[in-house]
Amino acid sequence: MVLLDVSSPETGTIMRVKGALEFKCQFESTDASLVHKAISRTFETLRSQVKSKSVVFLVCESPVIIWPNQDVYATHEEITPNTLWEDILQWIKGDEQEGTSKKSTKKKGKMITSVVNLRLMMEVTEPGQVVFAPTLSRTIQKHHFLNTTLPMDCVVHVPSNETMTFACENMLEKLVEQLDEMEKVVLRYIKGTALLVPQPLHFLLPKPKGGELVSIVFPAGLPDSQLETHRKELHQRFELPEDRPYFRRANAYHFPDEPYKDYHIRNPHLALTHPNLEDGKLYLVQGIYSYHHYMQDRMEDNGWGCAYRSLQTICSWFVQQGYVDQPVPTHKQIQQALVDVGDKQPLFVGSRQWIGSFEVSTVLDQLLGVTSKIMFVSQGSEMASKGRELANHFLTEGTPVMIGGGVLAHTILGVAWSETTGQIRYLILDPHYTGAEDLQVITDKGWCGWKGPDFWDQTAYYNLCMPQRPKAI
């Protein structure tokens, strides 16, 4: 595993190399010890290849090609071993690609991006090398042959004042280390001659280790439910609590230049300026969620689906924290769950009937196995006095809260609260938004924003569904 400090990305860039290495292993016997030795020899051959002069780094979206083991030779004449890594950014295209979230900006005439992607390749021939016609030979012998592709994916944080040599040497070291980890995983999970492809993933560790990106290799094809022992070892190694997941696949770090496949906006509240209250503290949702609102997913629910959308936002939190491996439920699936538990009649499925906080808690229990607490507020004017309860919820559970009152439902993502003065502000995610996935519009127009106590109808009753975080790793 590899630790990478990304706590100060503004002082450098993330260098990410991805590519495929061919794994070809031949052995005459299926004896476990002989198979393990053959696999280890194959990995040693791959490590030698990575250290050889045939390794090539192709800088994506640029004309630059680098031979890291040949004194950091590059195709561009201005690039030398002592060239600063940040100077290579000027040759990377800054055009935004349609359908991606990649952002690049110009600064001092250079293209600045947080992630520089490179492709790992192997040079087949050397310049001036004489290529001979192949010679074929035939040998009749029984043997076993394993052939697969190893998906290499390595990251290195390169400070802006470091050279190309530093960047390349560190990346080559990480590639070798990742092959070491892949070998361990293959040998650990192989059954007979059935090899599970090792899959590298990157995870951002929580505070106080926040800012460290750790690379972990898991066997592809095995569900998270069968990797609990592996995860427990990782929790112990990194001194992490064993009451919540940090190393499930859903916890993997999402690089800023990669789009989400469902195109839902994640964590829009991070774009907000937080209120400044006298002696006040912030208590916010912990982790990642997606913003679900009216008219998404080709569902015309304007006027009746706000609680469904708030529930979907809550479900997305549990999905993206790794507690569940099922997709966010649709309106129909939510309705069917309420019918299945006997809360609604069969005709409820496919209807446009509202649901409230109690139905939201029922669905969370039925579909996700998540329990919830319900907070009753007899009138909106009492919400101003619920700072302590809400602060404690976000501090201990960290889940989004659904609040329903009358015909409206909203999602509370946090509070700014002063214990000394009693002042409070609520971080509200409004599911009634009907526009496009435009973060600036959503934040500028207050669809995700901080609200005061007067946001609530002072005479209406409210019920708050407060999902509880399961204890699992």
Image: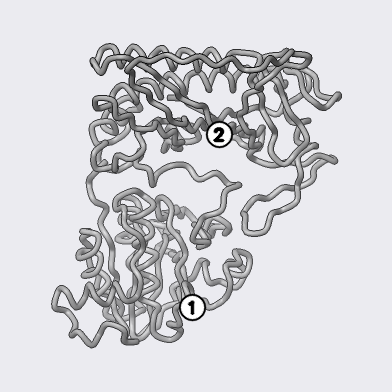
Q: Secondary structure at mark 2?
A: loop
- Give above or below for 81 relative to 228: above
Classify residue 346 by image quadrant: bottom left
Residue that badge 2 annotates: 6
Q: Nearer the viewer, residue 382 or 432?
A: 432
Q: Residue at x 65, y 40 (%)?
A: 114
- Give above or below for 101 relative to 158: below
Q: Nearer the viewer, residue 35 or 206?
A: 35
Q: Is residue 76 left or right of residue 34?
A: right
Question: Residue 40, percent across and down?
Answer: 38, 14
Kind of residue indicated by mark 1:
Met
Tell which residue pokes out farthest to the left in this image.
342
| Mark earlier in primary sequence (1, 2) | 2
Whether residue 425 appears in this view of the structure is no
Q: Residue at x 27, y 82 (%)?
A: 349
Kind of residue indicated by mark 2:
Val
Q: How many marks?
A: 2
Q: Is residue 269 left or right of residue 8?
A: left
Please say which color scheme the image uses.
Answer: one colour
How far, Cα to Cα, is label 1 from label 2? Answer: 37 Å
Q: Secondary structure at mark 1?
A: loop
Q: Which mark is residue 295?
A: 1
Q: Nearer the viewer, residue 16 or 234?
A: 16
